[in-house]
Amino acid sequence: MHFLVVGAGFSGAVIARELAQAGHTVEVRERRPYVGGNCYTRRHGTGVMLHVHGPHIFHTDDEAVWTYIQRFAVMRPYVNRVKAVSGGRIYSLPINLHTINQFFGTTFNPSQAREFIQARADASIKDPQTFEEQALKFVGPELYRAFFAGYTAKQWGVAPSLLPASILKRLPLRFNYDDNYFAHRYQGIPEEGYTAAIERILDHPNIDLKLDVEVSPRQADSADHIFWTGPLDAWFDYAYGRLAYRTLDFETEVSQGDFQGNAVINYCDAEVPYTRITEHKHFAPWEQHSNTLIYREYSRDCGPADTPYYPVRLSSDMQRLNQYLQSATSSNGVTFAGRLGTYRYLDMDVTIREALDIATGALSAIESNQSPLPFYVNSG
């Protein structure tokens, strides 16, 4: 069969590779002049490996996905240790025993800290519905105001009391001194960057890759089936209106030496206009650079010409999403995949896992002569 894959990020690349390895021909079309999507990396003039659309750290408990990415990249160990500036002081994130003792001026052991935080948590909130209620239920007002309220308002552009509790799915709170931002078994960054890894995934004789090419749904008739990793609402020409995203602006600064001594520092106070500063050479501690490059990161509403980063998913967006999903379920010949195609924020490991599952499902359907191929979209 002949397939068309729209988008050359992890979703599109993995789907294309699996189909190509099974003997099918695959056209991959990417509107940007490079592969990798928002994981795109390149060497900056300083020599630093730049995460162009903001930093990405690969972390997973899925051993099969970890094995898969290592087929195409040397994964160097990397632990993300985030710091936060709040009220003129710097703390360790996620909130851990060191953070608690430093913030409250205490010397608690784990059990004492747990009792202390539980006494401050709002026990009257039984079923938190908003981000603010979720935070207050677990950490109480002091830590919420210091680390979550201002940062969240800047990141999402609305008060935390208007955001759904699901955004704060698992409150990062530890009663030990573990400051590893992620808790997964496997964590790392590709030695040569993400783009080099995705280029290798797409390097197959059955894959025809073209960059800097726009593809509309009207062009999909040339293929037996299309895998669409672009925006879900774009496939339907925004018939129900645009789904809301937040986008990011990056203010770049180059200097000598070491700017902040750490890869990521969050700025939690509402008065500071940016959400964080990232220093990119610290994402590759196995390299040595005399110069340094930082991003000051600003979040704002995404316009039609902007790069979408985070789906907002407020109630109005979910109503609109349901309209698109109803249309999607009646659309033959297309499979929606990836963060844009499913209107979800996805970590890279989940993106790869879902892409592998989609390809497996498609190949199984082909083998059993099922027509049309199974519809797949997960927007939960």
Image (spheres, rainbow, N blue to C red):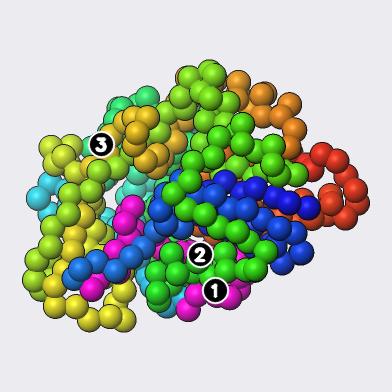
In three-dimensional space, the C-alpha distance between marks 3 and 2, rounded to whole angstroms, equals 32 Å
**Residue sitting at x 20%, y 68%:** 45
Task: Calculate the distance from the C-alpha at mark 1 to the C-alpha at mark 3.
Answer: 37 Å
Q: Which residue is mark 1?
A: 72
Q: Is residue 304 left or right of residue 89?
A: right
Residue of label 3: 154
Secondary structure type for disc 2: helix
Do the residues under discs 1 and 2 have CB atoms within 8 angstroms?
yes
- Residue at 25% from the left image edge and 71% from the top image edge: 48
Magenta stretch contains residue 62? yes
Foreground mark, 1 or 3?
1
Amino acid carrying mark 3 in the image: Lys
User: What amino acid type is highlighted by mark number 2?
Assistant: Ile
Q: Nearer the viewer, residue 255 or 111?
A: 255
Label 1 vs 3, first from the N-terminus:
1
Left or right of 377? Residue 307 is left
Q: Position of residue 95 (x, y in %)?
A: 32, 55
Figure quadrant of residue 132? top left
Would you say 158 lies left or right of 270 here?
right
The answer to which of marks 1 and 2 sits earlier in the sequence is: 1
Q: CA distance from mark 1 to mark 2?
A: 8 Å
Which residue position holds label 2? Answer: 198
Residue 16 falls in image quadrant: bottom right
Question: Viewer-proximal residue, 135 or 278?
Answer: 278
Mark 1 and 3 residues: CB-CB less than 8 Å, in contact?
A: no
> Which stretch did the figure color magenta?
47-74
User: Residue at 46% of width from left, 24% of height from top?
Assistant: 242
Q: Are marks 3 and 2 in contact (CB under 8 Å)?
A: no
Q: Position of residue 141 (x, y in %)?
A: 28, 37
